[in-house]
Amino acid sequence: MTPFFLNGESVTVDDDPSTPLLWVIRDSLGLTGTKFGCGMALCGACTVHLDGHAMRSCVAPLSRVAGKQVTTIEGLSSDLSHPLQRAWIEIDVPQCGYCQSGQIMSAAVLSLWPSECDFCGHGQACTTSPHTRERSGWWK
């Protein structure tokens, strides 16, 4: 049994401690906002917050979060009232929308830890984003 806090609520799961947190969140706890992208912590679609820091849940074992606070996209706000979620909707950011939860979670951590600004824009491998393609040289 692994106890931790998910979006402010105490939860205990009986999954194998080596199970990636992504699958615990999606399959065992039924929160599907966090997405599977690459399974190698490269694309960022699976980004969640662990004690206020961005973390790739596809490679983080459940044992890593024991007793800690995990926040998913659902935990930012249940009614899309978080400033980033509102801005996302107002300026019509999403393309296909699949990886947007990871992008929002990566950006949201910057309000808590401004020194992590180098994280912003890096590791979010959205292939529909011209900015991502341009920075990576895919357009050449």
Image (cartoon, helix red, strand yellow):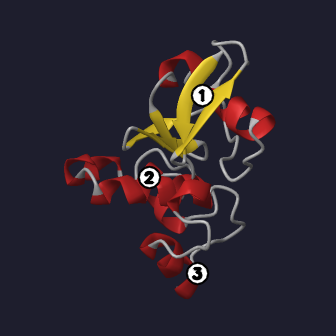
Nearer-the-camera pick, 93 or 72: 72
Pointer 3 with pointer 2, Cβ within 8 A: no
Q: At 40% from the left edge and 48% from the top edge, which residue is drawn?
A: 122
Q: At 26% from the left edge and 53% from the top edge, which residue is drawn?
A: 117
Q: Earlier in the sequence, mark 1 or mark 3?
A: 1
What residue is shown with label 3?
Answer: 89
21 in relation to 80, above or below: above
What residue is shown with label 1?
Answer: 40
Image coordinates of residue 76 in percent, x first then y, are: 51, 60
SS class of the residue under badge 3?
helix
Q: Answer few, some or many: residues within 10 Å of disc 1's Cα (few below 14, many 20 plus, some between 14 and 19).
A: few
Q: Answer few, some or many: residues within 10 Å of disc 2's Cα (few below 14, many 20 plus, some between 14 and 19).
A: many
Q: Answer few, some or many: residues within 10 Å of disc 3's Cα (few below 14, many 20 plus, some between 14 and 19).
A: few
Q: Amino acid at mark 1?
A: Met
Image coordinates of residue 34 in percent, x first then y, are: 65, 47
Per the model, the C-alpha gap separating discs 1 and 3 is: 29 Å
Q: Amino acid at mark 2?
A: Ser
What residue is shown with label 2?
Answer: 106
Q: At 25% from the left edge and 50% from the top edge, which residue is drawn?
A: 113
In this orientation, does residue 140 appear?
A: no
SS class of the residue under badge 2?
helix
Query: Residue 120 falls in which quadrant of the image?
Result: bottom left
